[in-house]
Amino acid sequence: MALSELPPPIDEESGEPGAELPLIRALPPGSMSKAWLARLAGVDAPWTEARRERRAAISGLDESPIVLVSAKGSNLADLDGNRYVDLIACFGAALLGHGSTRVARTIEMQSERLIFGLGDVYPSDSKIALTERLARLFPEPGARAMLGLSGADAMDAAMKTALLATGRPGIVAFEGGYHGLATGPLALNGLRPEYRTPFAAHISKHVRFAPYAKRAADLDASLSAVNDAVKSGEIGAIVVEPILGRGGVHVPPREFLSGLREIADRSGALLIADEIWTGLGRSGAILRSVEDGVVPDLVCLGKGLGGGLPMSACIGRGSVLEAWRNPKGVSPELAEGGLHGEAIHTATHFGNPLACACAIAVLDSVFGQKLAVRAQEEGDNLLKMLREACGPETKVKDIRGKGLMIGIEVEGGSPRALGLVRDLLMTGWLVLTGGAGDVITVTPPLTIPRKLLEGFVERFAQLASVREL
Ligand SMILES: Cc1ncc(COP(=O)(O)O)c(C=O)c1O
């Protein structure tokens, strides 16, 4: 089928575009979605199908996905003309919602000016303007930034910077942590062994894992494990998510980050905050670590930064990034011939002008519309509504989060959580699972109207009270 034959984009019923309740016309996945999925099955790398089969074995349900075709605001539409409320928002990245006019106009204008860049050779004006903006996000003067295309790129830049700045290869990461699946940050992955084990031969052996302080009672054990790890003198960085995101949306006690800061200072390691999920307003703050009173040495941002275009950044103290000129532990000859002479950290599309222009538009919107404050307020309200609506009959164990980054831990483990995700899909609400598969994660656009969150709470409580263990 030609793209022009696809169903029209979201039809709006009641006025405000992108703020509609669900509308299911054909039980998902409908026949059009099924037909396109069959085409994908023949050409996509087979791990997606393998995952679906495994999920079906766990939940006992048909786990076939829908095929998306258009979106506006907080609504997504599939090929069969069904309208959904998007509480995933591209894994938390669609901060402004879908089809932001500001981003769309920026794409149009910048496309006419300059799309391709020449990264580190001849920078574009938009790359320079964005780098300045990003450096200013850091709470201390003199900060610098390195751009990338994905969250994993930003983590890679942070890992390399830490090695150059300290001369130490060791890193402390956390159980349950997720920092991207490229080979560098895969070494930091404490979420699921399946991610690492097939590639173990390529993964750095210098990473030590400590338990994440998911609650106050875990704090001492977690910090003392980090303390033990740094005793080797080999640790150059402690890498932490200020809220454990994919690991199940765990908000640590405030003393966790400050404790890590103290250990890093004492041991000469850098503190790297992975704010790829928490940052830019998602958790109710532009930088969650700074809001919690801690200034890391390096901060990584990604996900929503490019407004849907690939863009990420590693931002840090000028004195730390100075290591790219004067690295520690690298012989002067190598530093001269390697660091000074070659572009040792670049990629064809790093600093892409179109993505840089969009990132500036995103920052303008996030700040201009005070989306961090909105996320905090709406998140608090959502937590309250969920806690009120989810009585014992819903078999919900815990409801937690900060800003619009919420986790609902359910009884019955991943089979029941997957069942609920499917029930919600069938009624037009899109969510994912996280943690050990038993947490339903809710990360809507930061612009989502309250009435949609109210609708979700009502539907969730209804479905959860009838889904058996
Ligand atoms: C905290 C965190 N770090 C890093 C990443 C990796 O980002 P990307 O998928 O863009 O590589 C993610 C993705 O979910 C994340 O949640």
Image (cartoon, rainbow, N blue to C red):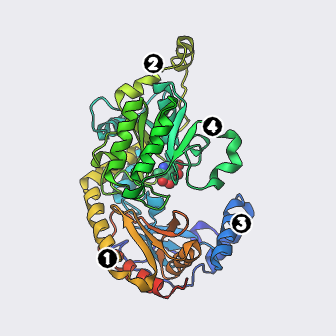
Asked whether the beta carbons under mark 1 and mark 4 sit within 8 Å of each other, the answer is: no
Give percent across and percent down for residue 347: 55, 35
Mark 3 to mark 4 CA distance (whole Å) = 36 Å
From this view, report whether residue 379 is shown above or below residue 427: above
Residue 377 appears in which quarter of the rendering? bottom left
Mark 2 to mark 3 CA distance (whole Å) = 50 Å
Q: Earlier in the sequence, mark 3 or mark 1?
A: 3
Q: Which residue is mark 1?
A: 385
The secondary structure type at the circle numbered 4 is: loop
Q: Amino acid at mark 1?
A: Met
Mark 2 to mark 4 CA distance (whole Å) = 25 Å
Q: Is residue 94 visible?
A: yes
Which residue sits at x=55%, y=41%? 208
Q: Which residue is mark 4?
A: 205
Of tags 3 and 4, the one toward the viewer is 4
Q: Earlier in the sequence, mark 2 or mark 1?
A: 2
- Describe residue 290's horizontal placement relative to residue 427 as left or right: left
Which residue sits at x=74%, y=64%? 42
Residue 326 is tagged as 2
Q: Which residue is mark 3?
A: 41
